Image (tube, helix red, strand yellow):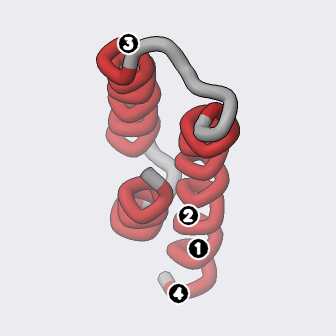
Amino acid sequence: WAIAGFGIGLGLGVNTASVWLLTAGLVGFLVYLGVHGESKQETEGWLFASAPAFILAWIAGFVVHSLAF
């Protein structure tokens, strides 16, 4: 999730297409949670940490995009 978020931010920066892809990724995360099933105590943290990692990597990607271009 984080690699995809960074790639979106780096490739597109902050624009409408980037935000739509971010939204699609977050909807995909919800689908992933539904498919994954009931959470287990030992994996629950890693399971839910992927959405914030996705968003933070997107932010880091568009910061790098802004500095590079």
Q: Residue 62: where, in percent of width, then height?
A: 56, 64
Q: Is residue 69 left or right of residue 46?
A: left
Mark 1 surroundings: few (<14), some (14-19) or many (≥20) residues within 10 A:
some
Which of pointers 4 and 2 lies earlier in the amino acid sequence?
2
User: Cβ–Cβ below 8 Å for labels 3 and 2?
Assistant: no
Q: Which residue is tagged 1? A: 66
Tag of residue 34: 3
User: Cβ–Cβ below 8 Å for labels 3 and 1?
Assistant: no
Q: Amino acid at mark 2?
A: Phe
Q: Amino acid at mark 4?
A: Ala
User: Cβ–Cβ below 8 Å for labels 1 and 2?
Assistant: yes
User: Cβ–Cβ below 8 Å for labels 4 and 3?
Assistant: no
| Element at label 2 | helix
Q: Which residue is tagged 2? A: 62
Q: Amino acid at mark 1?
A: Ser
User: Cβ–Cβ below 8 Å for labels 1 and 4?
Assistant: yes
Q: Residue at x 45, y 28 (%)?
A: 26
| Element at label 4 | helix
Vertical comparison of 53 with 17: above or below: below
Which of pointers 3 and 1 lies earlier in the amino acid sequence?
3
Q: CA distance from mark 1 to mark 2?
A: 6 Å
| Element at label 3 | helix
Tag of residue 68: 4
Q: Amino acid at mark 3?
A: Gly
Q: Residue 1: where, in percent of width, then height?
A: 43, 51
